[in-house]
Amino acid sequence: MSEQYTIRRKFFKLFGSSFHIHDAQGTVVGFCKQKSFRLREDIRIYTSEAKDTELLRIGTRSIMDISGTYVFMAPPNPGTAGEGEVIGMMRRKGLTSTFLRDEWLILSPQGQQVATLREQGSFLSFARRYIDFVSLISPQKFDIFRQDGSVAATLRQHFNPFLYRMGVSITQDEKTATDGIDDLVILAAACLVSIIEGRQQ
């Protein structure tokens, strides 16, 4: 399955970090500069490094969001205050993600589950958390499963000791128009996984 998007992030950033999103032709279609030491998440992804046009926002509802729910929002309309329309949400699945492998629930704007994002493997996923060199020789791979068990997308980290690179492959089939998971939601999920993994490394 071909990769429609690639997320690239440099390692060794001391104060915040940044990443670029490239399309299949290698053109930059997204840019994010993260700030360190924020109590409440407010991640803004722009269409370029100029940061003059927003593509997407990822945030939490409050400072102490114990549910671990991240909200995906479209940018607000020009000239209006406040936040844009919620297009989806993602919530980490408790102890499974802590001890075994990463697993997230992807939710609709109304809070209903529409998909599951799950890290492939079990032993290697466990080993990556506690043995440093395993994460270098065995990059992560995730699947996004629809509610019927079919794969809506695959996220694959490419091996590179100096550059974090995640490919995003979106399944294009007859279910795509009705599964409640559009390309922007999948891309938001991939960006969030890249950010979380970067903080854990």
Image (tube, rainbow, N blue to C red):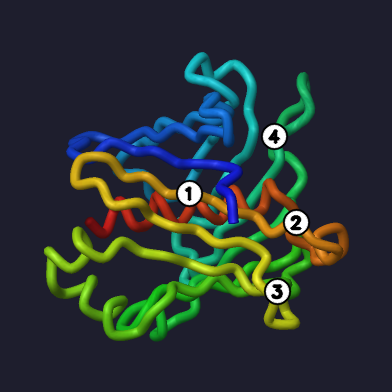
Is label 1 in a helix, a strand or a loop? Answer: strand
- Residue at numbered disc 2: 172
Amino acid type indicated by mark 1 = Gly
Residue 136, horizontal then vertical, whole percent: 19, 59
Q: Earlier in the sequence, mark 1 or mark 3?
A: 3
Q: Are marks 3 and 2 in contact (CB under 8 Å)?
A: no
Mark 2 residue crowding within 10 angstroms, few (<14) / some (14–19) / many (20+)? few
Nearest to N terminus: mark 2 or mark 4: 4
Residue 175 visible at all: yes
Precedes in sequence: disc 4 or disc 3: 4
CA–CA distance between discs 1 and 4? 24 Å
Number of marks in picture: 4
The residue nearer to you, when weighing 102 against 166, is 166
At 18% across and 38% down in the image, what residue appears? Answer: 12
What residue sits right under mark 3 in the picture?
A: 146
Residue type at mark 4? Pro
Residue 25's spot in the image, x, y percent?
A: 57, 29
CB under 8 Å between discs 4 and 3: no
Which of these two is toward me, 100 or 142? 142
At 59% across and 16% down in the image, what residue appears?
52
Badge 1 is on which residue?
167
Q: Marks 2/4: CA distance?
A: 26 Å
Label 1, label 3: how far apart the Cα atoms are: 19 Å
Is label 1 or label 4 in front? 1
Give the residue pinned by disc 4.
75
Task: Report how far apart the C-alphas of labels 3 and 2 lie in the structure.
Answer: 13 Å
